[in-house]
Amino acid sequence: MHRRHRRRRPPATAALLALVCAIPVGISATSPAPAEAAPTAFAHPGVLLSKSQLDFVRAKVQAGAQPWKSAYDQMHASKYASLSRTPKPRAVVECGSYSNPDYGCTDEREDALAAYTLALEWSITRDTRYAAKAVQIMDAWSGTVKDHTNSNAPLQSAWSASTWPRAAEIIRYTYGGWPADKVDRFGAMLRNVYLPKVVNGSRSNGNWELSMTEATIGIAVFLNDRTVYDKAVATFRNRVPAYIYLASDGALPKTVPGSGLDTRDEIVKYWQGQSTFVDGLTQETCRDLTHTGYGLSAIAHVAETSRIQGQDLYPEVADRLRHALGFQSKYELGTAVPSWLCGGSLSQHMGPVTEVGFNALHNRLSYGMDNTQKLTEQRRPAGTDNLFTAWETLTHANNPS
């Protein structure tokens, strides 16, 4: 399920971070004007979920309302909610292509998902045992991990660091039992171990860079770091138009500045050999729908966090994201694949990735999204991909906040 071999990028430096304002934004000519900058003060909890969203979820579950109650029951029965979990931190996590070798890769991702799951359990039940277990897992890793190595190190860092800040934000701002020195140590882990692997992105692959951007924006919120936050937004504005095609882009998809994709042949090859471009096609549709789902999930997650922080990026990506969700959902629902699309065959399936984007675009912004709605409701409750997406029927189904 993991990506092809990629070269590791060097750690970020203060000088690189200072270049954020020089990065071109590359927004489609038909996109709305960029949103105003987020407020100087960050909102907390504020990574993927706000306090009002958490309160909405708790009220629905406590009332036994559907689909939230069944989604909670699914989460509660999962291994990630176990109070007997023993974390398995490593000083060096080594992940090769397709997690071969897997020295701590699965353990790290699953411990991060467990910390997030336990934080949600705490938020819903107010049972301090769940919060304490989440703290135990986060403290175990922050006191141990020093580096990620081998070809999948950037991606592994991105997946794990997309999840850790969600858990940490909930615990830090709704539970009083996490000692300040351990909070600081966790923040140092995010800044010194994860951030250097993700902050500069990966111009060679779409879902890699989108996941890295999600990790970067989450870290920025936890650290209250405006410079890192702004760099994540700049990367997002470059990558999303280069990942999802719209007819308004012209004959060929947009490219990321500096990507080295200069000719039609190069672009077609990068788009997995696809030479016919239609609204909602993604750079990885013809690779497989699973990796496409990773990219779409990360786009929605970044936009959701930005909205909580007062800089709503959804209007900038709404047309691309709604078309992409609808296009992929249509074929997930069983529509025959035409011969011009990926040679008449699509590989694999999307995971539980539609809830966040569907809620934002359909319920909040009132876009018609028939295919996405049908697929989303058909697959409820959405579980976890065991990588970085988890329990989004519970957290985002019809969540108005």
Image (spheres, helix red, strand yellow):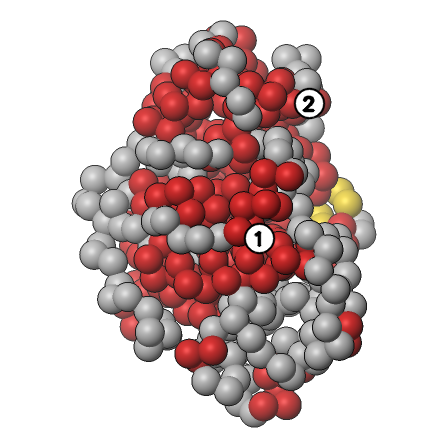
Q: What residue type is labelled 1?
A: Asn
Circle 1 residues within 10 Å: few <14, some 14–19, many ≥20: some
Rendered image quadrant of residue 77? top right
- Depth check, front residue: 358 or 335: 335
Which residue is at a point 27% across and 36% down the rendered structure image? 43
Height in image: 12 above or below 388? below
For label 1, the residue is 371
Can residue 141 be seen at all in this image of the molecule? no
Which residue is at a point 34% across and 26% down the rendered structure image? 51
Which residue is at a point 32% across and 40% down the rendered structure image? 308
- Depth check, front residue: 50 or 99: 50
Height in image: 64 above or below 335? above
- Depth check, front residue: 70 or 192: 70
Q: Which amino acid does label 2 sit on?
A: Ser
Instruction: Kindly report the distance in space between the C-alpha atoms of the residues bearing marks 2 and 1.
Output: 29 Å
Height in image: 133 above or below 302? above
Residue 85 at x, y = what percent?
A: 68, 18
For label 2, the residue is 78
Circle 2 residues within 10 Å: few <14, some 14–19, many ≥20: some
Can residue 311 be seen at all in this image of the molecule? yes
Which type of secondary structure does the marked residue at label 1 adopt? helix
Q: Depth-wise, is mark 2 or mark 1 nearer the camera? A: 1
Tag 2 and tag 1, C-beta contact below 8 Å: no
Residue 18 at x, y = what percent?
A: 30, 63
Residue 401 at x, y = what percent?
A: 33, 33
Q: Is residue 200 left or right of residue 67?
A: left
Residue 314 numbered tag: none
| Mark 2 or mark 1, earlier in chain | 2
Which residue is at a point 63% across and 13% down the rendered structure image? 83
Which type of secondary structure does the marked residue at label 2 adopt? loop
Height in image: 180 above or below 8? above
